[in-house]
Image (spheres, grey):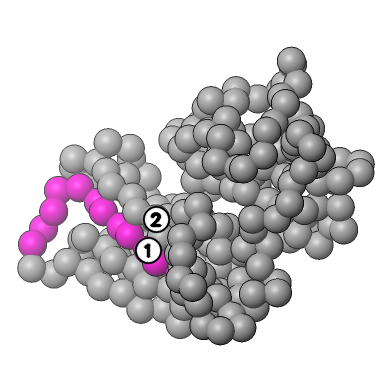
C-alpha cells in the first residue's frame, strides 16, 4: 500500500518500497534579490543533503535524482549540479541517474532550486517506524541554520561518516534527521511518550536547517558522537 512516512513518500512495489524525498531552496544564492548570499555550488550541496539523509536513514539505496533550477544552466545550474554531485560523492554514492531542468526563457532575479531523490528499499530492511519504547534519545551533530553553518565545511554538524557509523551500530534502533521544526518538533511526530532531561546541551526548539543534526534512538550505551537528551517511555 502506497503511503507517506514523515517527509518521505513510499510507493509499494511488492517486496520493495520506492522511497522518495524532496526539498527546495528559494532566495539563497548570488542573484540580486537573494536573501542569503551563497555560491550556487554550496546551494547544490545543501539542497540535496536533507532528502539524501532522509532516504539513507530509511534503509534505501539511492537510485535516481532530479533537480529543477529556476535559473539559467550556465553558470548557475551547472554550479548547483557540481555541488549536488560532490555531496553524493561525500556520502559514498556514485552510481546514480541524474536528470533535471533549468530556466532558459527568463532571467529571474533570485535563485530557486528543487530536488527529488528516489531510493529503493526492501520492506524487510526499512528502518523507520520501529518500536522505540524504552530507547534512549540522543542527538548527533548540532542544530544550526543559515550563516551559522561554517562554510565550506562545518565539523560540528552531522557528517555522512557519523551517519554511516550510527546506521551500522547494533544498539541504534532508528535515526531521524532534524529540520526546521527543531528537535522538539521532530519528537512530537513519534508515536511514543518522551521524557527530556532537565539540562540539555542544545536549544530544543531551534531549527537545524539542512539536517545539521539527527535524533538517535538507541539501546545501551550512547554511540560515539551522540549526546543523550532523554528517554522514550515504555
Q: Is 168 colored magenta in this rendering?
A: no
Instruction: Report the residue at 22% width, 69% height from top.
Output: 102
Instruction: Report the residue at 86% width, 46% height from top.
Output: 219
- In the displayed structure image, the side of residue 78 where residue 110 appears, left or right: left
Mark 2, Cα crowd under 10 Å, few <14 / some 14-19 / many 20+, is: some
Instruction: Report the residue at 60% width, 26% height from top.
Output: 204
Instruction: Report the residue at 37% width, 72% height from top.
Output: 66
The residue pinned by badge 1 equals: 115
x and y, in percent, of residue 227 in the image:
78, 34
Which residue reaches farthest left? Answer: 105
**Mark 1 element type:** strand
Could you give the CA–CA distance between mark 2 and mark 1, rounded to whole angstroms? 6 Å
Which residue reaches farthest top? Answer: 198
Residue stretch in magenta: 106-118
- Asked if 205 appears above or below 91 in the picture, the reply is above
Q: Is 107 colored magenta in this rendering?
A: yes
Marks 2/1 in contact by CB < 8 Å: the verdict is yes
Q: Which mark is residue 185?
A: none
The residue pinned by badge 2 equals: 23
x and y, in percent, of residue 218 in the image:
81, 46
Q: Nearer the viewer, residue 24 or 15?
A: 15
Mark 1, Cα crowd under 10 Å, few <14 / some 14-19 / many 20+, is: many
Quarter of the image holding residue 75? Answer: bottom left
Amino acid at each position: 500500500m502506497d503511503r507517506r512516512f514523515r517527509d518521505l513518500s513510499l510507493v509499494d512495489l511488492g517486496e520493495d518500497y520506492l522511497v522518495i524525498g524532496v526539498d527546495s531552496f528559494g532566495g539563497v544564492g548570488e542573484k540580486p534579490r537573494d536573501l542569503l548570499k551563497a555560491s550556487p555550488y554550496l546551494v547544490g550541496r545543501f539542497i540535496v543533503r536533507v532528502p539524501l539523509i532522509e532516504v539513507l536513514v530509511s534503509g534505501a539505496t539511492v537510485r535516481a535524482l532530479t533537480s529543477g533550477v529556476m535559473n539559467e544552466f550556465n553558470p548557475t545550474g551547472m554550479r548547483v549540479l557540481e555541488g549536488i554531485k560532490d555531496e553524493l560523492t561525500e556520502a559514498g554514492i556514485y552510481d546514480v541517474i541524474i536528470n533535471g531542468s533549468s530556466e532558459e526563457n527568463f532571467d529571474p532575479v533570485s535563485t530557486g532550486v528543487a530536488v527529488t531523490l528516489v531510493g529503493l528499499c526492501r520492506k524487510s530492511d526499512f528502518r523507520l517506524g520501529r518500536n522505540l519504547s524504552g530507547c534512549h534519545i540522543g542527538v548527533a551533530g548540532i542544530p544550526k541554520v543559515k550563516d551559522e553553518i561554517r562554510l565550506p565545511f562545518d565539523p560540528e554538524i552531522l557528517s555522512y561518516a557519523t551517519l554511516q557509523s550510527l546506521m551500522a551500530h547494533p544498539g541504534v534502533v532508528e535515526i531521524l534527521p532534524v529540520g526546521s521544526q527543531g528537535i522538539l518538533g521532530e519528537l512530537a511526530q513519534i508515536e511514543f511518550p518522551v521524557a527530556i532531561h532537565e539540562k540539555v546541551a542544545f536549544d530544543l526548539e531551534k531549527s537545524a536547517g539542512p539536517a545539521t543534526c539527527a535524533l538517535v534512538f538507541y539501546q545501551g550505551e550512547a554511540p560515539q558522537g551522540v549526546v543523550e537528551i532523554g528517554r522514550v517511555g515504555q
